[in-house]
């Protein structure tokens, strides 16, 4: 491992003006750790996982931690993605998403970010099937129906909340 680090260090020194050399994807972390910090470059993964989920220490002009968490939840919801850890969403993936969110906030500024967020929410409401199903349910209840068409076909959370059984459940 020392040999690998030495070769890597020599290659970097001899390549000062040229392109940067990074270790191969499968290179040992131990070899990278032996390279002095001044010569070491961050990997793409390290750049993406710069901040932990809900770490607001790097947010410029932050309105507050609770508001930033809510903006993150809304931002993820515009693409129908969860903002919490689940069986299919891991903490490292949320760390990466949070880092991208913070960098976008810092790059664009609060006003521009909020404009984009509101635009994405409007687009999502107009195009997503879940919001369409909610609209059908709301209109059905507004027309004094016992439950909505979505409840009969897929099962609607709102109608189920009122203990309405689907036809397949009663048969």
Image (spheres, helix red, strand yellow):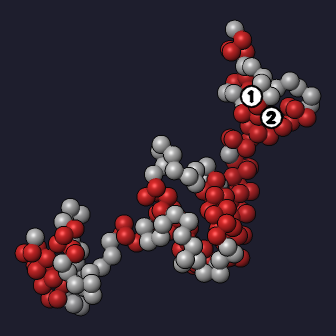
The mark nearer the N terminus, 1 or 2, is: 2
Vertical placement of residue 83 versus 136, above or below: below
Eye-nearest disc, 1 or 2: 1
Vertical placement of residue 88 versus 114, above or below: above
Q: Residue furthest top?
A: 171
Q: Residues within 10 Å of mark 1 (few under 14, many from 20)?
A: few
Q: Secondary structure at mark 2?
A: helix
Q: Are the residues at dot 1 and dot 2 in contact (C-beta closer than 8 Å)?
A: no
Disc 2 designates what residue?
Answer: 137
Q: Secondary structure at mark 1?
A: helix
Q: Quadrant of residue 12?
A: bottom left
Q: Residues within 10 Å of mark 2 (few under 14, many from 20)?
A: many
Residue closer to the observer: 110 or 62: 62
Q: Position of residue 27 (x, y in %)?
A: 19, 65
Residue that appears at 20% across and 80% down: 35
Can residue 100 be seen here? The reply is no
Q: Quadrant of residue 135?
A: top right
Q: Quadrant of residue 3?
A: bottom left
């Amino acid at each position: 491992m020392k040999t690998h680090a030495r070769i890597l260090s020599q290659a970097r020194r001899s390549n000062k003006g040229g392109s940067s050399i990074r270790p191969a994807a499968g290179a040992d972390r131990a070899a990278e750790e032996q390279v002095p910090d001044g010569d070491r470059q961050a990997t793409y993964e390290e750049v993406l996982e710069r901040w932990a989920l809900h770490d607001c220490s790097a947010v410029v002009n932050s309105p507050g931690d609770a508001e930033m968490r809510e903006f993150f939840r809304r931002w993820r919801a515009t693409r129908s993605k969860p903002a919490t850890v689940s069986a299919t969403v891991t903490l490292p993936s949320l760390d990466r998403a949070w880092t991208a969110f913070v960098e976008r906030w810092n790059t664009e500024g609060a006003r521009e970010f909020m404009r984009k967020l509101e635009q994405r929410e409007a687009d999502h409401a107009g195009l997503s099937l879940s919001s369409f199903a909610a609209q059908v349910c709301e209109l059905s209840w507004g027309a004094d129906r016992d439950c909505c068409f979505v409840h009969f076909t897929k099962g609607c959370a709102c109608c189920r909340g009122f203990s309405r059984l689907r036809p397949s459940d009663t048969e």
